[in-house]
């Protein structure tokens, strides 16, 4: 569920927005498809640069009371975190996820404040409409209980029926809007919890990595052992294997085996393997 999409259904009355340039959330939506495709191909550095550039340019001017803007900023930080994971920069990914969780929390608070007012509007109208329906249904029953109805009474009966049907439709709309509000707030809370959980999980991976590296005796030994595991685990998705390979490259940039593994996943030919080897020196022929 997209909170930005269903918000429109929840708000009863909104002031018309003046004509303006494309919003941050709209720009993120347009760029996201391209970034997702680039991440799928493994181009993490390009995505990270583009996302960080948009964050630097647009995040400071995001309206803190507009949770559509805040939701876009959260989405940008989540994309930056994913690019960092694929790049092997897991500490940076944790930082972005923690920031996303904090902004998602602000987003939930802002939405709760706004939608609480909208909820009260709906609840007040519901009470008014339900009472009106009850009153007019009583008048309808009184009319129907009479043995014969005049022309004016028949006309009044039609008016009462139209009024009741109109109010019943309004009640159904408000009840649906209240359910939508509940869905929005629940989704925003789930977003915050999800980012907090992801940040904690990556912190756990980093802590485990440090323990295993210490147990191996050195980073170089740890990387040499781990790359063999990653290479053998070819059932895992390419994204995960590439992220792990690049992580190992960051830990030990001099490990040629890791570089060859990452290059292979990216479809890059390892030039070192193609360099012609020097021909062995020919032994001089013995004279007869």
Image: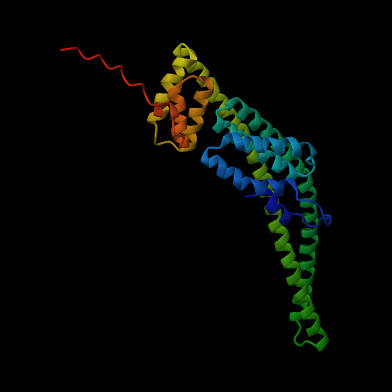
Residue 101, compared with residue 143, is above or below; it is above
Question: Where does the image place residue 21, in percent across and percent down from the top left?
Answer: 79, 51
Rendered residue at 56%/37% (across/down): 43
Residue 194 makes an appearance in the image:
no
254 or 152: nearer the viewer: 254
Q: In this view, does 4 lie to the left or right of 259?
A: right
87 or 155: nearer the viewer: 87
Q: Is residue 233 left or right of residue 152?
A: left
Residue 212 makes an appearance in the image:
yes
Q: Farthest left residue?
A: 288
Question: Where does the image place residue 82, in percent across and percent down from the top left?
Answer: 58, 35
Rendered residue at 70%/33% (across/down): 102
Residue 129, compared with residue 178, is above or below; it is below
Q: Farthest front residue?
A: 288
- Asked which quadrant contains residue 288, the reply is top left
Question: Where does the image place residue 78, in percent across and percent down from the top left?
Answer: 63, 37
Question: Where does the image place residue 155, in percent across and percent down from the top left?
Answer: 80, 83
Rendered residue at 49%/15% (across/down): 219
């Amino acid at each position: 569920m997209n909170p930005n999409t269903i918000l429109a259904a929840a708000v009863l009355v909104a002031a018309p927005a003046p004509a303006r340039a494309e919003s941050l959330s709209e720009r993120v939506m347009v760029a996201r498809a391209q970034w997702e495709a680039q991440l799928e191909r493994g181009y993490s550095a390009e995505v990270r640069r583009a996302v960080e550039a948009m964050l630097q340019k647009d995040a400071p001017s995001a309206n803190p009371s507009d949770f559509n803007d805040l939701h876009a900023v959260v989405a940008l930080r989540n994309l930056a975190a994913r690019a960092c994971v694929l790049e092997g920069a897991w500490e940076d990914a944790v930082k972005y996820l923690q920031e996303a969780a904090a902004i998602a929390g602000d987003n939930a608070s802002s939405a709760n404040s706004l939608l609480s007012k909208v909820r009260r509007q709906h609840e007040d109208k519901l009470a008014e409409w339900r009472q009106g329906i009850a009153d007019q249904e009583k008048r309808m029953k009184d009319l129907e209980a009479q043995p014969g109805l005049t022309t004016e009474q028949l006309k009044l009966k039609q008016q009462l029926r139209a009024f009741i049907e109109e109010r019943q439709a309004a009640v159904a709309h408000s009840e649906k809007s209240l359910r939508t509000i509940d869905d929005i707030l629940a989704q925003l809370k789930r977003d915050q919890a999800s980012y907090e959980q992801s940040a904690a999980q990556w912190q756990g991976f980093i802590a485990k990595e440090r323990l295993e590296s210490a147990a191996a005796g050195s980073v170089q030994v740890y990387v040499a052992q781990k790359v063999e595991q990653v290479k053998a685990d070819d059932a895992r998705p390419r994204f995960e294997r590439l992220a792990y390979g690049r992580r190992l490259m960051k830990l030990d940039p001099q490990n040629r085996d890791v570089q060859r593994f990452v290059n292979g996943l990216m479809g890059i030919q390892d030039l070192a393997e193609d360099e012609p080897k020097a021909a062995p020196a020919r032994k001089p022929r013995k004279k007869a």
